[in-house]
Image (spheres, rainbow, N blue to C red):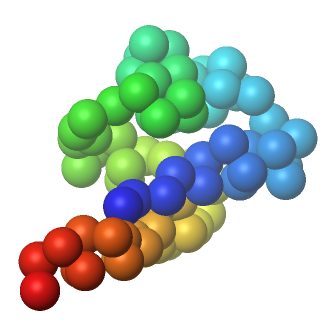
């Protein structure tokens, strides 16, 4: 499972999605979908712009957590 930390990162900096839209040039629709966990795929360019804007690494925005349920069903 991929955990999205974008809402937390923005909140910690007291930023809104609109601030990120203005600063990165990424569309409002795209950033709202990422923010609300409604994206099924994200362009590398978008991730790059978010990392640069927030001064973070990719792993600070997105985190992979192994799903124990999937692991148990595959055995």
**Residue at horizontal 36 percent and vertical 77 percent from the top:** 68
The one nearer the camera, 58 or 63, is 63
* Percent position of residue 51, x then y: 49, 57
Query: Is residue 44 positioned above or below 29 on the image?
Result: below
Residue most extreme to the left? 74
- Residue 57 falls left or right of residue 8: left
Query: Is residue 33 positioned above or below 7 on the image?
Result: above
Q: Quadrant of the N terminus?
A: bottom left
**Residue at horizontal 67 percent and vertical 19 percent from the top:** 18
**Residue at horizontal 33 percent and vertical 70 percent from the top:** 69
* Percent position of residue 37, x then y: 47, 35
Query: Is residue 39 positioned above or below 52 on the image?
Result: above
The one nearer the camera, 62 or 70, is 70
* Percent position of residue 39, x then y: 34, 31
The one nearer the camera, 30 or 25, is 30
Q: Quadrant of residue 70?
A: bottom left
* Percent position of residue 19, x then y: 70, 27
The one nearer the camera, 50 or 39, is 39
Q: Quadrant of the C terminus?
A: bottom left
**Residue at horizontal 60 percent and vertical 22 percent from the top:** 22
Residue most extreme to the top? 29
Specify whether residue 25 is in view.
no
Specify whether residue 14 is in view.
yes
- Residue 44 falls left or right of residue 27: left
Question: What is the tally of numbered marks visible in this picture?
Answer: 0
Q: Quadrant of residue 64?
A: bottom left
Q: Quadrant of residue 46?
A: top left
């Amino acid at each position: 499972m991929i955990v999205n930390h974008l809402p937390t990162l923005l909140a910690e900096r007291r930023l809104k999605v609109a601030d990120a839209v203005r600063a990165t040039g990424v569309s409002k629709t795209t950033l709202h979908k990422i923010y609300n966990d409604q994206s099924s795929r994200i362009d590398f360019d978008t991730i790059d712009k978010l990392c640069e804007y927030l001064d973070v690494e990719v792993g600070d925005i997105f985190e992979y957590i192994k799903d124990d349920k999937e692991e148990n069903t595959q055995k």
